[in-house]
């Protein structure tokens, strides 16, 4: 095979069954990207980017980590190097990313968006930079057209409770046919020991029109924002936590803890956990009332490099997998909500592969027959959204639950060029099933298995999110 055909029609599909499942049942389905971090302003403004670096490298901490590992100076990663210099340094890095998912993603994205099938390296860098930049800097590659190119039907961005949602409102009034939703992300209201917590609560009070002096005021302000998001067609929330919090607490304790914080007192770890447990339960009971889907991204150990965090801030490539205990608190938390019949649809994403089977069995404890796949084990996330991680997640889910009810893939990305990750997932799914058909572990029933593939690719999410 020549290097120019590395990305071809049957990429990752190892037999005829995998090929049939992908091409006839999965590839044709639209994309529902129910969790990402795209800029709604860029979508609403239908932004056209100046060059390939601005849409492809800027903000992508996956690429940044790889470049740093190779020894690329920060000037050409997040610094004041020119956009072209940053691209050339990324191109130099790409051949060294073999066996990292970045190698596959890079060439899938070049092929799908730009029709470029040449391998990216130092030799091809100048040529590919000029060709891709010329295309990007045209109306055909505006943000809305980029979403059209991948056959997206729904994308859901992620916003803080203080967000005005002005860009979502603009989109709702526009003639853009792809639905753009938002997810409510209240982490800053939960994590009471974070720097700047009181300043954030002050802002939340201003936005909600409620002066927040007491814990009851905080709950009222958050409910106010949930109502506002709901009025703007939000039906999804998300939480990025190291683990679920569930400490025993009394109302009087939580009231006193919040008062102490508002008076700039120093909270113990136990006090913070009691507060975080209480506010999380309050939020989740409110989500149930509004019929939302709640998501929990668990297990990241963030901002490990204190020096670089001071220089560059969060979300710049200094996070890793954490090894937190998960099972007992998660079980108690879900049980507390379920015991009061206030457990809404729930997706749990796991970052530590050692906990895959924990999560796969945990969801079965709270699937009560009221809704198909009510509690979901979410797709391989962050460090696990690669071939090995996705296969392990799907195997755990298959062995201990029903993969046929799975709501499938999402990008969780800040990049408008990341949507081929859906294709990557779909190819891996089809190859996994196709291999088992060939080995006789699954029947050669393409009608039924094809339906299952189509459901996981699209229809399960469409039903689950009521789209």
Image: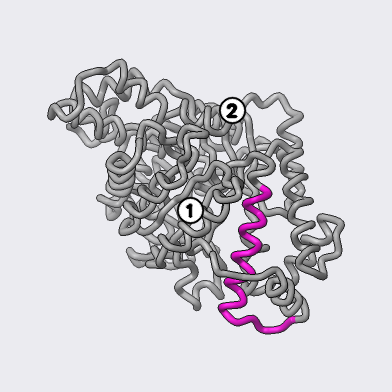
Q: Residue 409: image x %, image y %?
A: 43, 38
Q: Quadrant of the N terminus?
A: top left
Q: Which mark is residue 60?
A: 1
Question: Does residue 285 belong to the magenta stretch?
Answer: yes
Looking at the picture, tell me which residue is in the foreground, 452 or 166: 452
Badge 2 vs badge 1, beta-carbon distance below 8 Å: no
Q: Is 252 colored magenta in this rendering?
A: no
Up/down of 358 relative to 234, above or below? below
Q: Tag on residue 176?
A: none
Q: Is residue 341 above or below residue 209?
A: above
439 lies left or right of 72: left
State the residue lying farthest toward the top. 447
Q: Position of residue 53 (x, y in %)?
A: 50, 48
Sort mark 1 into few (<14), some (14-19) or many (20+) by Cα contacts within 10 Å.
some
Provide the major secondary structure of the magenta segment: helix
SS category of the residue bearing label 1: loop
Q: Quadrant of residue 420?
A: top left
Per the rendering, the mark at residue 467 is 2
State which region is magenta.
264-286
For residue 299, what is the image quadrant?
bottom left
Q: Residue at the front extreme?
A: 339
Q: Residue at x 22, y 28 (%)?
A: 434
């Amino acid at each position: 095979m020549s290097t120019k055909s590395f990305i071809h029609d049957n990429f990752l599909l190892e037999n005829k069954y995998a090929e049939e499942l992908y091409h006839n049942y999965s590839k044709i389905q639209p994309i529902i990207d129910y969790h990402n971090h795209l800029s709604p302003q860029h979508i609403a403004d239908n932004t056209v980017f100046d060059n390939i670096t601005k849409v492809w490298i800027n903000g992508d901490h996956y690429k940044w980590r790889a470049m740093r590992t190779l020894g690329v100076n920060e000037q050409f990663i997040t610094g004041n190097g020119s956009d072209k210099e940053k691209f050339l340094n990324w191109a130099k890095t790409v051949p060294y990313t073999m066996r990292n998912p970045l190698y596959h993603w890079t060439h899938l994205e070049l092929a799908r968006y730009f029709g470029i099938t040449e391998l990216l390296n130092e030799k091809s860098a100048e040529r590919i930079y000029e060709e891709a930049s010329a295309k990007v800097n045209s109306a055909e590659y505006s943000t809305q057209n980029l979403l059209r190119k991948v056959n997206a039907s729904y994308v859901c961005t992620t916003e803080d409770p203080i967000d005005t949602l002005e860009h979502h409102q603009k989109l709702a009034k526009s003639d853009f046919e792809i639905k753009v939703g938002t997810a409510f992300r209240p982490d800053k209201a939960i994590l009471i020991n974070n720097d700047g917590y009181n300043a954030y609560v002050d802002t939340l009070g201003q936005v909600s029109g409620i002066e927040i002096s007491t814990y009851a005021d905080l709950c009222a302000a958050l409910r106010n924002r949930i109502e506002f998001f709901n009025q703007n067609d939000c039906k999804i929330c998300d939480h990025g936590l190291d683990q679920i919090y569930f400490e025993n607490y009394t109302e009087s304790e939580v009231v006193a803890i919040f008062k102490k914080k508002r008076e700039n007192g120093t909270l113990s770890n136990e006090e913070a956990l009691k507060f975080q447990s209480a506010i999380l339960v309050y939020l989740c009971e409110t989500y149930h009332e509004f019929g939302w889907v709640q998501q929990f991204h668990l297990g990241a150990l963030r901002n490990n490099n204190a020096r670089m965090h001071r220089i560059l801030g969060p979300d710049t490539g200094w996070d890793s997998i954490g090894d937190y205990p998960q099972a007992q608190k998660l079980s108690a938390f879900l049980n507390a909500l379920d015991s009061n019949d206030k457990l809404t649809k729930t997706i749990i994403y796991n970052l530590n592969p050692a906990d895959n089977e924990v999560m796969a069995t945990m969801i079965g404890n709270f699937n009560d027959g009221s809704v198909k796949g009510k509690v979901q084990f979410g797709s391989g996330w962050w460090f696990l959204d690669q071939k090995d991680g996705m296969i392990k997640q799907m195997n755990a889910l298959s062995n201990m639950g029903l993969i046929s009810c799975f709501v499938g893939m999402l990008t969780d990305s800040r990049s408008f060029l990341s949507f081929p990750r859906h294709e990557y997932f779909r190819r891996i799914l089809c190859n996994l099933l196709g291999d088992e058909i060939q080995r006789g572990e699954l029947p050669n029933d393409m009608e039924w298995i094809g339906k299952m593939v189509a459901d996981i690719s699209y229809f399960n999410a469409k039903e689950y999110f009521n789209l």
